[in-house]
Image: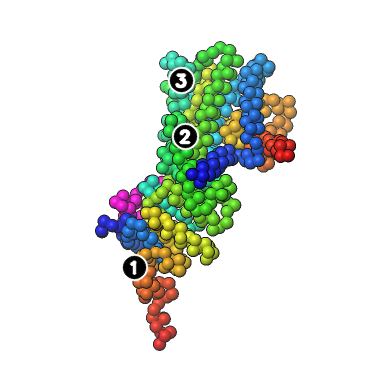
């Protein structure tokens, strides 16, 4: 009886600590403090989002909307690269397919916003399945090169399949569901947070563990029963879905799309976002998107030395914060919480 | 072959380019038996385990476990069929905790998959709890439960080998394939391992074990197959194997050399 109880106690203790420590080091932190911190930061974040349109000018609000759109696309890369360990330099192709799907459905067939968004996501999933079968046998640099190839093929299709895409002229007059920039910003943030919540809770299940196992030792993962190819394809499909949704949000936001927005440069921008933001954390997608959308226009006062400083900053992050800006922020948070936990524990002991 | 044979390896041939790594290897293991697989380095023992677990596709031949054909399956399907393995060069996830290492082995049987986890099916919580309970049981069985939260990389060599075993048994396999489980262990640990493996067999698991430690193999196995240059020389009891001139020749060189020394 008591042995059984001991076992349950041990299980409870181990389970909580292991779950909490899986993706960041939370050792020595009072769970109550991290709960308080989390609640406060959520409230601050949501309050900031709600107030932002009233606080900033039109340009900055436009940038904030763009950041939350790229946040969605970059989250897909976080699952694909950060969790499953596959490199893709073709994410913009998936964004483009989602954008064109939404644009065509909205302008030619009169589909509503609520329908085009999920359909655009599914178009990204379908592209992931089509592309995944031949390319997911590749790993590392080979897959990266293949993904560039996929990006180029999709780009060529966009330019030359005039009957559908209208070639270089693109598709115009895509009408937003809401007129006000403020409302559209709220909509993109809401969709971004909904996807983030789904991906975050997926990662807390053993599926996140299966992805980690795959990323770090594929042979051992297969030998321990994880269906390797199928899980890679799933990661690819999730990534495609995020990109497709982001593409649709982008199309509505701009009102006009052409192949220009979905080239290799855009793929590399999304890749840089997740690396600068932090591959190992879903929040890395948010931090990366914010940094890379807001920094360039706001650094323009630097004049001609802008690219130099920008490039140098990117280099510094890669060298000194391999887990990206989000990783560094989380480390700082955990450091502070650990200090506070330690100091209050001393007070309680006597 | 007879019905009591649990594992049947039937004329397996494996080639790497021009090299014939396994040449028509056949043998059988009965249910609840510990079968040894010995032979000099490069004789094809590890290759055979890789063939059995789907890592290599053999050129010819079949492997069946209680009527289920394993050849042609992917490694994860072999695992799902109840066959678990350990690796010659330990393959654990050093950054993950012991708990997570073992829990990965329980993933397949938990029925948790990306789509049902994403849809948050009602049984999800129950399945995760089941996985975690099985994980702690497996760790406890190998006396690793008190290190459950530590990263696996921090363990000693012998403990890492035990961790691999715990991970292999977490899904209650019917057949264990062990690739040199005693290599690098000290005599106390080897003894301990022997007891643990017997314990597993008493629980109904069959074991195929590759090992170079002859004292360990002879003391543990009920029957032994010997490989040399990809060919099976013989299958027999430990006594038969030890007395076989062919086996002695495979390990020590030609018998004519030995007889000439004697005369």
* Other-residue count near label 3 (Cα within 10 Å), few / some / many at <14 / 14–19 / ≥20: many
Frontmost of labels 2 and 3 is 2
Q: Which residue is mark 3?
A: A116
Residue shown at the point (65%, 19%) measured from the top left: A52
Helix, strand or loop under label 2 = helix
What range of the chain is rendered magenta? B57-77
Tell me the quarter of the picture where residue B27 sits. Answer: bottom left
* Pointer 1 local density, CA inside 10 Å: few below 14, some 14–19, many at least 20: some
Q: Is residue A290 above or below residue B75?
A: above
Q: Position of residue A224 (x, y in %)?
A: 45, 47
Task: Using the rendered view, name the quadrant where residue B38 is placed.
Answer: bottom left
Instruction: Kindly state the secondary structure of the residue where label 3 is placed.
Output: helix
Badge 2 and badge 3 in a common chain: no
Q: Chain of mark 3?
A: A
Q: Nearer the viewer, residue B201 or A94?
A: B201
Q: Position of residue B34 (x, y in %)?
A: 38, 60
Mark in the foreground, 2 or 1: 2
Q: Residue under label 1, please give it.
A: B236
**Would you say residue A314 sits in the magenta stretch?**
no
- Label 1 sits on a secondary structure element that is strand
Would residue A108 appear left or right of A295 to someone viewing this image? left
Q: Residue shown at 49%/44% (left/top)?
A: A1
Q: Which residue is mark 2?
A: B125
Distance from the alpha carbon under mark 1 to that under mark 3: 69 Å
From what the image shows, is residue B81 above or below residue B178?
A: above
Task: Give the farthest residue toward the bottom.
Answer: B263
Q: Residue extending furthest front? A: A1
Residues A56 and A139: in front is: A56
The one nearer the camera, B193 or A66, is: B193
User: Which quadrant is home to the C terminus of chain A?
Assistant: top right
Q: Earlier in the sequence, mark 2 or mark 1?
A: 2
Q: In this rendering, is residue A91 above or below B195?
A: above
């Amino acid at each position: 009886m008591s042995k059984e109880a001991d076992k349950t106690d041990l299980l409870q203790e181990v389970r909580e600590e292991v779950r909490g420590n899986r993706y960041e080091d939370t050792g020595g932190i009072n769970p109550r403090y991290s709960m308080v911190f989390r609640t406060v930061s959520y409230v601050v974040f949501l309050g900031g989002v709600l107030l932002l349109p009233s606080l900033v000018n039109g340009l900055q609000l436009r940038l904030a909307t763009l950041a939350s759109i790229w946040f969605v696309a970059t989250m897909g890369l976080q699952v694909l690269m950060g969790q499953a360990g596959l490199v893709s330099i073709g994410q913009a192709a998936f964004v483009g397919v989602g954008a064109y799907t939404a644009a065509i459905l909205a302008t030619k067939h009169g589909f509503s916003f609520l329908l085009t968004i999920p359909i655009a996501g599914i178009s990204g999933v379908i592209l992931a399945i089509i592309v995944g079968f031949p390319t997911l046998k590749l790993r590392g640099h080979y897959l990266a090169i293949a993904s560039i190839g996929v990006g180029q093929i999709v780009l060529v299709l966009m330019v030359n399949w005039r009957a559908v895409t209208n070639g270089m002229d693109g598709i115009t007059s895509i009408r937003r569901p809401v007129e006000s920039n403020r409302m559209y910003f709220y909509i993109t943030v809401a969709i971004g947070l909904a996807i983030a919540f789904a991906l975050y809770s997926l990662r807390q299940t053993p599926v996140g563990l299966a992805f980690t196992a795959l990323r770090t030792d594929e042979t051992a993962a297969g030998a321990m029963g994880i269906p390797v190819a199928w899980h890679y394809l799933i990661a690819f499909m999730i990534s495609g879905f995020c990109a497709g949704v982001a593409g649709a949000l982008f199309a509505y936001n701009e009102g006009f799309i052409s192949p220009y927005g979905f080239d290799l440069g855009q793929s590399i921008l999304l890749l840089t976002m997740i690396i600068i933001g932090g591959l190992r954390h879903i929040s890395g997608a948010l931090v990366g998107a914010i940094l890379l959308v807001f920094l360039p226009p706001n650094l323009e006062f630097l004049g001609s030395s802008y690219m130099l400083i920008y490039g140098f900053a990117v280099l510094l992050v890669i060298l000194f914060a391999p887990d990206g800006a989000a990783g560094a922020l989380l480390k700082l948070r955990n450091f502070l919480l650990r200090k506070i936990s330690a100091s209050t524990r001393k007070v309680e002991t006597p | 072959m007879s019905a009591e044979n649990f594992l049947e390896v039937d004329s397996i041939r494996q080639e790497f380019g021009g090299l014939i790594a396994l040449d028509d290897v056949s043998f059988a293991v009965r249910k609840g038996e510990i079968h040894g697989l010995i032979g000099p380095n490069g004789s094809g023992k590890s290759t055979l385990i890789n063939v059995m677990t789907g890592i290599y596709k053999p050129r010819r031949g079949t492997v069946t476990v209680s009527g289920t054909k394993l050849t042609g399956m992917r490694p994860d399907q072999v695992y799902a069929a109840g066959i678990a393995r350990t690796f010659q060069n330990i393959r654990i996830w050093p950054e993950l905790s012991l708990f997570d290492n073992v829990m990965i082995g329980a993933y397949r049987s938990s029925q948790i998959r990306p789509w049902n986890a994403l849809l948050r099916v009602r049984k999800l919580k129950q399945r995760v709890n089941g996985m975690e309970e099985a994980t702690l049981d497996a760790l406890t069985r190998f006396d690793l439960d008190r290190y459950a939260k530590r990263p696996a990389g921090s363990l000693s060599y012998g403990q890492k080998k035990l961790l691999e075993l715990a991970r292999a048994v977490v899904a209650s396999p019917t057949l264990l394939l062990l690739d040199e489980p005693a290599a690098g262990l000290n005599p106390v640990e080897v003894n301990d391992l022997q007891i643990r493996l017997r314990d597993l067999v008493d629980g109904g698991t069959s074991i195929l074990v590759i090992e170079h430690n002859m004292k360990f193999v002879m003391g543990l196995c009920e029957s032994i197959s010997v490989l040399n240059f990809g060919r099976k020389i013989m299958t027999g009891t430990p006594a038969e194997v030890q007395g076989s001139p062919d086996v002695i020749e495979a390990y020590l060189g030609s018998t004519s050399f030995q007889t000439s020394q004697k005369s």
